[in-house]
Image (cartoon, rainbow, N blue to C red):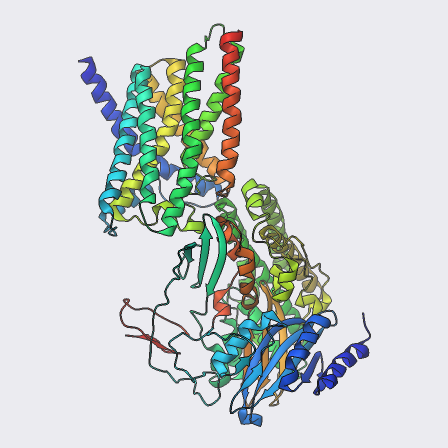
Amino acid sequence: MEFILLTSTSITVLLVNTILPVIMDGVERKIKARIQSRIGPPIVQTLYDLLKLLEKEVKPLHIMPFILLTIIAYLSTIIASLYFINLYTITGEAYYSITAITLFAISLTSNTLTPLLLPSPFTYTGGMREVILSIVNEPAFIVSFVLASTSLRLLNLQSPNIWILIALSISLTTLVLSSYAITGRIPFDIAEAEPEIASGVLLEFSGKILALLLLSNLIKRFIVKYIVSSLILVYIIGAGLTCLAASILLTIALWIIYAIVAAILGRSRVDLAPITLGKVYILLLALSITVLLVGIYGG
Amino acid sequence: MEGEKLILDKYIELSRDMGGKASIEGDTVHIIVPSEKLVEAASKLFNEYQCDFRVCVGTDERPLNGYFTITHIFTDNRNGLYVLLKTYIEPQDPKVPSITNAVPGADWCEMEARDLLGIEFTGRTPYRLVLPPEWPKGLHPLRKDVPYNYRPQIRGVSEKVSTTTETGVIPIGPYHPALHEPEYFELYVEGEKVVDVKYRGFHVHRGIEKLGETRMTYQQVNFLAERICGICGFEHSSCYALAVEKAAKLDVPERAQFIRSIVLEVERIHSHLLWLGVAFHVLGYDTGFMHVWRIRERVMYLAELLTGSRKTYGINLIGGVRRDINEEKKQKTLEVLRELEKEYKGLIEVALSVPQVRKRASGTGVLPREDALKLSVEGPTARASGIDKDARRDLPYAAYKYASFRVPVYTEGDNLARLLVRVDELVESMAIIEQLLDKIPKGPILLEKYEIPEGRVGVQVVEAPRGGDVHFVITGHGKPYRWRVRAPTYSNIPALRVMLRDQPLADAPLTIASIDPCFSCTDRVLIVRENGRREWLRLTGGLKI
């Protein structure tokens, strides 16, 4: 009975969390518009865009079966990842979070592969940029997630170890930074970079295929924040439905903050973004590991 | 400053040394040399006298004197002189030595004269520049015996993208998000580094010079000239009017000249703000883009207040302008300018502090001074590479001699330097308008009666937002006998090859945008595709299936 309840709750939340990114994208467009002194499109505009794309014809690609395969792999693994985060938030079981992170990493890899299958120079260039960014971001995201989880498990709120607290702050900073970079927002939208490579990775896709890809990308944006939110809130308020609701609300808040940051920056150059990020990640992670070790063995 | 007589003697002596003759009319030195001495004379003007090469003009003067002619237009910016180096060409087999070895900037204008007039240039490799590849051989539209409405039946063919196994090819254009007009750049890349560039333009050649010389009157050409460009059209109509007025030696009312200068600066402000917005968009800084275009609306309002139109003002006439500035408009203009300046300074301070804007513009798309000089580039592109030239100061026209202003010059030659030149120029333009409004004299705004004698030559450079516009006019009966237009982008595009080489691909759109290219000014044959079926190109009748 408990399993059925858990599954049905997770699926319901899954449906909500699949639609929510579409609405949040509309909110983001509205926020940007306000910052730029524009009225902007209605909040449901992204939903309208996706529905319209579903009615449009698909430009045939000679390797369509492969493309479909990678896109479906991307969408299904990302939705599965979302499902397991829901389970983690409700139960607090670590293996759910590990499964979610693993599926998320697989989904990102599928997404990175898709543009490399196409002969268009713009898509290929965008794809290569995506690969470079993934090589830098994904390990940083996973390692910082593991470090933050470990720090949280070791932290005793009644008598906190200062070293572990510092290690937690650093790993959370890295986690938030890498989660921002993974969303592909400015200044890290170099794989699309519309004025430079004519929307790069998205250029050759059309109709339903494009709609699927865009939806997957929006869910990806949601998941990276949702993982961060769940990780923190499961520890602070404990797993359960309250935690689930709070995690979704925190995800929405993070989405708004990310939208504001993206609106006030420009696009980084392809050689600058990965190098700068790489240096920052190495520094932060090394610092976080060192401090954590001091916290465990020194304190 | 050399003595005026000494300077003029220098040019007279040059003509004598070359076995030619010279005459001086106002601010223009006319030098005629035999064609075998053309290269030597051009080289001396460009390399020794350090004159600025602007453009060359091929003319079918057979109905006048039995010859074709080629006139190379130089300007002596230090002494405020136009130097026209002309040679006559035998009509049976029109050949003339090319000056490109001495003056590389003459490459395009020579090939344009070859396409449109059939003048062959010896000592260089010829290629088709303006006319499409399938255009009939021996048909040269600018010759006087070719009617303006003659339409050869030709079939349009697609030009293929180059294929190479050594490097990747990235086609930019004819349609690309970073290009707002149909042009084609082929970037050869190794990884993300551009190793070479090929350019193909003139997709939208409109044959306006032929129209101006055949179907229109002197006054009508003003309105055609203004339609050369959707951004800096007033610069073109002013340049044309000033060239005709100079040829006819008309004494245009001073108040009209003040109004021209004021509106020219309004146009510069809106153009530079438009460019800044585009540059920020290319840099991914869309918030800067939106806010710059928001404050640009104030300038569009000013344009409407002063001329009655937001764009394509239509107030220029030979002999003056059609619209006056009264006290109410003057006060309103000053008020709007004050608000604009305050908003602009605040906005630009924020925009330039965005790390990606500075990092990406800095050190990219570098055009060294030597290359800029060699290619005779114009406007902010030249001034960002350390070339201190500005026709408003060097070759004063309209009412600029009554205004005090600084010409911003940077030496880095990169995208940031070109951005900063425009940023500084905006402030100067606002100051110029304030000064001119303060000093505007009373009086008429239009010459009521005047005559334009035939066979006179007038040449004018007007400093448009992108650099010097050049209009060359030989007066005819009721209309120009010859009207040559050269927009600054025509001089600046060849420099892109230098600027794009060995640069990251990601910076290519910004570097292309950094010269503020205006392809409609540069191109002048309209191709309209319909349903992608069989296509027939006609010179003025568009495309028929």
Q: Residue at x 67, y 54 (%)?
A: B411
The single residue placed furthest to the front in the displayed view is B166
Q: Where residue B341 sits: x, y (%)?
A: 62, 51
Q: Is residue B372 visible?
A: yes
How many numbered discs? 0
Decide if residue A128 is on the left or right side of residue B446: left
- Residue A208, by quadrant, is top left
Quadrant of image for the N terminus of chain A: top left
Q: Where residue B117 sits: x, y (%)?
A: 50, 83
Q: Is residue B298 visible?
A: no
Q: Is residue B107 above or below residue B213?
A: above
Q: Is residue A30 above or below residue A180?
A: below
Foreground residue, B135 or B454?
Answer: B135
- Residue B149, by quadrant, is bottom left
Q: Is residue A258 above or below residue A236?
A: below
Q: Residue at x 46, y 84 (%)?
A: B215
Decide if residue B248 is on the left or right side of residue A259: right
Foreground residue, A55 or B254?
Answer: A55
Foreground residue, A62 or A146?
Answer: A62
Decide if residue A26 is on the left or right side of residue B246: left
Q: Is residue B117 above or below residue B311?
A: below
Decide if residue A240 is on the left or right side of residue B213: left
Q: Residue at x 30, y 19 (%)?
A: A96
Q: Where residue B377 sits: x, y (%)?
A: 60, 65
Foreground residue, B469 or A248?
Answer: B469
Q: Where residue A184 sits: x, y (%)?
A: 41, 38
